[in-house]
């Protein structure tokens, strides 16, 4: 009971009763001022419209007194004549009878820097001053650009113009109209100026009348409104406020005072709502206690799931002590407790290293579960297959089975041949990685295939590039480039390239941390809405490793004709060491001839194209290796896509064609094809011992 009495004392009904009328008075005062200002603007617009109509009538009356064909004669030095005198007399009469300040007719020069007066009349009782004589020149250089623009509009465009100027005496209005000759060409400007001295009197009368009536109506409205407000609002509201305070201090129990609030008004509805709230609150407290306990249990389980997911991703860097030529670092920052992004890397054999980065659609637990399945399948199949495209094809079919939730995975996978630096990769709808190569930082862009789990039976394409010692490749998910700040701006690919180019000297770990810091600075306080995953792989130049030794590289361009087959073979032979065996030489000749003749016969219209051939001779763990790359800009064609012939059949039972490229693949250690920037690029590599 003591607590109830104390709470009741804190509710001051007089405070509400006093404040509300004060607010009403303040509101009405503001409304009074605003209405007066708006009324004055309307009044001003009306009399300006009236002045415009009147002055234009005077202007066209004055225009009827003037012969437009005589203007040029007066402006070129002519003197007054009877016609001029008669027109001037009529203009003077109009000036006095219409109580105008003055009427003048001017001819501006071509640059509108000066004007010549043809006619000028002054009303001595309206304004002090003398009229300018015929031929008087006056400068326009002191006038502002708006004034000159108005003159040009009248003279050049034939527009009427009315301008109002307000000052302490009331101001004046100037209306200008074009003076035209008989051909309709503007030859001068006629302007009349009428004072608006009566404006001050009209304004004072308007403000006085408006102020008196508005003040009376405002006072009456305030008095009536305060009485009604007290009866209908403040008194019932005080009861609701006091009971609500009692409700808070007694843990949801009410005193019963709200029963006195009758009727169907909003306050009565509020009173009934407070009574119902008392019932609902006790039920809610009971439910909340149970829900909080359940939430704590789920939070603990999510913490365990977060730790499990983190433990599934490799976290030992550098990854392999017996392969110091590989420098790698990766990180994954989920947007929620668990995420759908993942990365992985593993050795498929002693000379091949696979890296994978993926992004599952959606967020939270469903995406995390799908991520576990996708990552596991990619690694299991990756340990059996050497082609990223073939790995994607198998994993895609398995993920499509039972995918009722409609989830999918964008994924990038590359397999690096450590001894040669050759990187074969495939892209399943993923963002293009960034490559550091030849002193440049750029996106490794190819046409991506469909994401995994999108549709069964999809085919994926392998692409190939070569990493030289010191080259680096940075693979990431779209959580990096699509990070959004408070202004709803994306971090974007351009910012990523600039950041990486600026931090290229850092280690793999340092570079990832620098990119994350740059993204965080850009995003600021905006919440992270997508997982952020990054992986960087560097091929280091390790002493004693044949893959890091420099080699001999030569390039030649040949016309794609059969006659150049001999020079092509001579060029390839010139790159070979002197102790190259006849068997290896013959196999190289067969492979080069097969690819070159295919280009000459099928890539172009005969005799219209060229072939760029590059040969790289290097040492692979002490053994010489030659890599031959043939590049043409002919029709896109992948000879490796053709199915190998069944050589177990008799010659007459086999389909025609396909044997040459089959032998090429058999004779070479590796053969890859890619179509990039409008070029077919076929690369062959073979050890020479």
Image (spheres, rainbow, N blue to C red):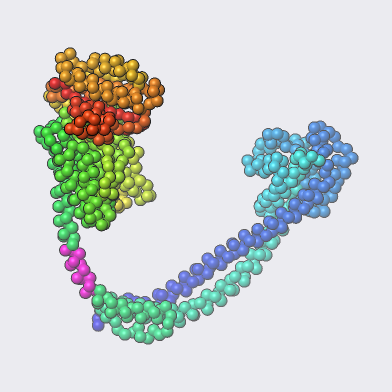
Q: Residue at x 14, y 37 (%)?
A: 348
Q: Position of residue 661 (x, y in %)?
A: 25, 28
As drawn, is 580 to the left or to the right of 19?
A: left
Q: Determine which quarter of the picture holds residue 314.
A: top left
Q: Magenta span covers which residues?
A: 285-297
Residue 477, visible in the rendered structure:
no
Relative side of 615 to 126, left or right? left
Residue 470 percent across, percent down from the top left: 22, 29
Residue extending furthest toward the left? 322
Residue drawn where x is 18% and y is 37% of the image: 386
What's the magenta bit mostly, secondary-structure-wise? Answer: helix
Q: Residue at x 49, y 77 (%)?
A: 226
- Does the magenta run of residues contain 292? yes
| The N terminus: image quadrant | bottom left
- Where is residue 176? Give x, y as percent: 73, 46
At 25% from the left and 74% from the top, the residue drawn is 284
- Residue 598, percent across and down? 31, 26
Decide whether residue 167 is among the magenta residues. Answer: no
Tell which of 61 and 339 is nearer to you: 339
Q: As displayed, is residue 526 above or below residue 600?
A: below
């Amino acid at each position: 009971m003591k607590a109830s009495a104390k709470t009741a004392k804190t509710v001051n009904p007089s405070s509400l009763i006093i404040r509300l009328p004060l607010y009403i008075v303040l509101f009405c005062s503001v409304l009074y001022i605003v209405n007066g200002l708006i009324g004055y603007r309307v009044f001003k617009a009306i009399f300006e419209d009236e002045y415009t109509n009147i002055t234009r009538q005077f202007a066209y009356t004055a225009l009827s007194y003037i012969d437009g064909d005589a203007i040029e004669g007066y402006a070129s030095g002519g003197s007054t004549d009877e016609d001029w005198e008669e027109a001037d007399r009529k203009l003077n009469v109009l000036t006095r009878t219409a109580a105008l300040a003055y009427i003048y007719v001017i001819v501006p020069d071509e640059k509108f820097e000066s004007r010549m007066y043809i006619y000028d009349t002054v009303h001595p009782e309206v304004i002090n001053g003398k009229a300018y004589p015929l031929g008087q020149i006056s400068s326009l250089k002191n006038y502002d650009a708006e004034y000159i623009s108005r003159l040009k509009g009248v003279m050049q465009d034939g527009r009427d113009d009315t301008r109002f100027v307000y000052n302490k005496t009331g101001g004046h209005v100037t209306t200008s109209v074009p003076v035209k000759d008989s051909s309709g060409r503007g030859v001068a400007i006629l302007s009349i100026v009428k004072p608006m001295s009566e404006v001050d009197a009209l304004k004072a009368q308007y403000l006085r009348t408006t102020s008196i009536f508005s003040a009376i109506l405002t006072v009456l409205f305030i008095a009536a409104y305060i009485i009604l407000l007290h009866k209908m609002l403040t008194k019932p509201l005080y009861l609701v406020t006091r009971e609500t305070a009692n409700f808070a201090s007694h843990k949801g129990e009410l005193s019963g005072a709200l029963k006195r609030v009758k009727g169907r008004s909003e306050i009565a509805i509020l009173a009934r709502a407070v009574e119902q709230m008392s019932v609902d609150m006790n039920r809610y407290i009971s439910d909340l206690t149970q829900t909080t306990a359940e939430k704590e249990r789920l939070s603990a389980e999510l913490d365990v799931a977060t730790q499990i997911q983190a433990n599934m991703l490799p976290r030992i860097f550098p990854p392999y002590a017996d392969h110091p030529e590989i420098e790698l670092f990766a990180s994954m920052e989920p947007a929620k407790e668990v995420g759908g992004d993942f990365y992985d890397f593993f050795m498929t054999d002693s000379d091949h290293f696979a890296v994978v980065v993926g992004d599952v659609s959606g967020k939270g637990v469903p995406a995390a579960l799908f991520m576990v399945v996708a990552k596991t399948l990619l690694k299991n199949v990756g340990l059996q297959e050497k082609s990223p495209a073939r790995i994607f094809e198998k994993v895609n079919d398995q993920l499509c089975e039972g995918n009722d939730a409609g989830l999918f995975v964008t994924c990038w996978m590359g397999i690096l041949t450590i001894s040669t630096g050759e990187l074969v990769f495939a892209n399943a709808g993923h963002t293009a990685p960034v490559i550091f190569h030849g002193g440049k930082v750029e996106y490794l862009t190819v046409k991506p295939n469909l994401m995994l789990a999108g549709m069964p039976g999809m085919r994926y394409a392998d692409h190939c590039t070569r990493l030289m010692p010191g080259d680096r490749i940075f693979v990431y998910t779209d959580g990096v480039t699509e990070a959004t700040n408070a202004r709803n701006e994306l971090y974007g690919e351009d910012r990523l390239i600039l950041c990486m180019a600026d931090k290229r000297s850092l280690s793999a770990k340092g570079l990832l941390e620098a990119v994350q810091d740059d993204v965080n600075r850009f995003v600021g306080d905006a919440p992270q809405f997508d997982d952020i995953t990054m992986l960087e792989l560097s091929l280091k130049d390790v002493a004693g490793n044949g893959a890091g030794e420099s080699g001999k590289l030569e390039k030649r361009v040949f016309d794609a004709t059969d006659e150049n087959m001999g020079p092509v073979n001579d060029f390839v032979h010139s790159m070979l060491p002197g102790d190259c065996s006849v068997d290896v030489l013959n196999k190289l000749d067969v492979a080069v001839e097969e690819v070159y003749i295919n280009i000459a016969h099928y890539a172009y219209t005969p005799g219209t194209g060229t072939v760029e051939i590059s040969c790289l001779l290097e040492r692979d763990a002490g053994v010489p290796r030659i890599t031959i790359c043939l590049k043409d800009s002919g029709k896109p064609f992948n000879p490796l896509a053709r199915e190998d012939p069944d050589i177990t059949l008799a010659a007459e039972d086999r389909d025609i064609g396909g044997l040459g490229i089959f032998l090429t693949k058999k004779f070479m250690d590796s053969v890859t094809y890619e179509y990039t920037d409008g070029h077919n690029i076929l690369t062959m590599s073979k050890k020479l011992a």
